[in-house]
Every structure is written in C-alpha cells, then in structure tokens.
Amino acid sequence: MTRERRRRVIRTRRTTTGLMLAGAISFLAGMTDATGLALTGDFVSFMTGNTTRAALSLGGGDLRHAAILLSAIMVFVLGNAAGIVIAHFADRRTFAVLSCVSIALATASLMMGESVAMPRFYLIVASMGMVNAAVEQIEGLPIGLTYVTGALSRFGRGLGRWIIGDKRLEWTIQIVPWAGMFAGAVMGALLTQIAGAAALWVIAVFAMLVALASLLIPKRLQRRFNATPRSAVRTK
C-alpha cells in the first residue's frame, strides 16, 4: 500500500468514526429536545425557536414566558461554556462531556412535580448546551450537534457550489446531524407517549452508553474533534 493510499484509508476511518459519533449524539439531542418540548412546551436545544417565541411573548405582553425563554437561552450558552471547560481538563473529552450530560439528565428525571418544573427544564437545557462540546469538527469541517439549522445551511451552500462546478463532496456530511436529530426526535416523542417524564431515564442511559462507547475511540483521534483555539495555534 502506498503512503498516499494509506493516508486516504486513515482519513476515511477517522471521518467514519466521527460521523458515527456525531450521529449518535445528534440522536441523543433529538430525543431530549422532543421529550423536553412534550414535557414543558418549550424547546431545550432549539434556541432559534426560543428566541423567536421570547420575542413573540414580549410583543404579546407575556413577560413571564419571555423571561423563562430568555433565561433558557442564557443557560444554554453557559452549558456550552461548561462543556468546553470539562473537555479542556479531560483526557477523554467525549466521555467526560457525555457522562456529565447523562448525570444531568438522570438528575432531571428525578425532579417530579410542578414545584421543580423550572429547575428541571433549565437542567435539561444546560445538558443540551454541554453536549455540543463533545464533537466540534470532523476533518476540519464544523459539525453541529443540536443546531441543525447551521448544518442544513452548510449542506445547502455545498450543494450550490457543487451545482456550479465545485465537485468536492465534504459538505454531504452535514446531513448526518440532521438525520440523527430527526430520528432521535421521533424516538423521543414515542418514549414520552409511553413513559412520560420517565423517558428522561432512558435518554440518560443512552447518553452514558454513547459515553462508554467513545472510550473505544483512540485519544489522538478524539483530539481531532476539538476546534483548536486561535491563541493555542499562535503559541505552537
């Protein structure tokens, strides 16, 4: 096998592994979002939707609902930040992040009753922000796990470039998080219909299973899923 062919084989394996992991995490996000929406009436990972709904609530004079949604957006941002911090200090970033997500969802599943409805909602939102730190890129291409609007936009732009003559097909990987999110949302809807709030237990277990499966991925490969900060690049 020539050196060039070996490189192509290795890159294909890396890409396949990354896409399988991204698909599984997007499936997790889809399940959580559908369950959270069914339980609370608001999105737990779709912050574009929450932004629009918050604006509508403000315009309609429903200040309480607007405050809830704006707070959820802030919690989601903080969840993303927490995920990055956890990933930074962990040897196994994906395992560490998904383990924390699993614990957060398991804790949320224990919060029963109206008195803890809001804390449960915000805990689920934080976990969905956190999950985005598990995988940030695949072979240098940004990948979205809970925000599939960006993935669909990149897919559409790639399709446009292909139509006008650019024959590169890397953009096709952007359909993976959308497909995972859609399939996960269907499963989440079914689980919630069957088990109600107890569906969060199932989702927490799934998150831990994905976390454990990520231990099979070599450390050097997991580092490639991290978006290197510019400051780190300058110091090399």
Image (spheres, rainbow, N blue to C red):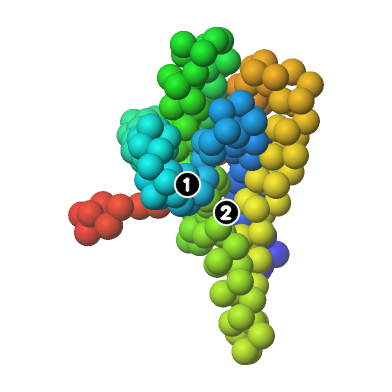
List the residue tagged with mark 2.
148
Say if 50 sits above or below 148 in the image.
above
| Residue picked out by circle 1 | 53
Q: Is residue 215 left or right of residue 206?
A: left
Foreground residue among 184 and 43: 43
Amino acid residing under circle 2: Val
Estimate the x, y position of residue 87 in percent, counting from the top left.
39, 35
Name the outermost residue toward the bottom.
Answer: 164
Q: Label 2 to label 1, Cα distance in Å? A: 18 Å
| Dot 2 alpha-carbon crowd within 10 angstroms: few under 14, some 14 to 19, many 20 or more | many
Marks 1 and 2: in contact by CB < 8 Å? no
Q: Secondary structure at mark 2?
A: helix
Q: Is residue 227 left or right of residue 6?
A: left
Residue drawn at x 62%, y 43% as measured from the top left: 26
Q: Is residue 39 above or below residue 219?
A: above
Q: Is residue 30 above or below residue 35?
A: below
- In this orientation, which residue lies closer to the viewer: 24 or 92? 24
Residue drawn at (55%, 58%), measured in percent from left and top? 149
Instruction: Kindly tell me whether residue 205 is visible in this rendering.
Output: no
The amino acid pointed to by label 1 is: Arg
Q: Quadrant of the N terminus?
A: bottom right
Disc 1 packing (10 Å; few <14; some 14–19; many ≥20): some
Q: Choose mark 2 or mark 1, whichever is in front.
A: 1
Residue under the point 54% across and 38% down: 43
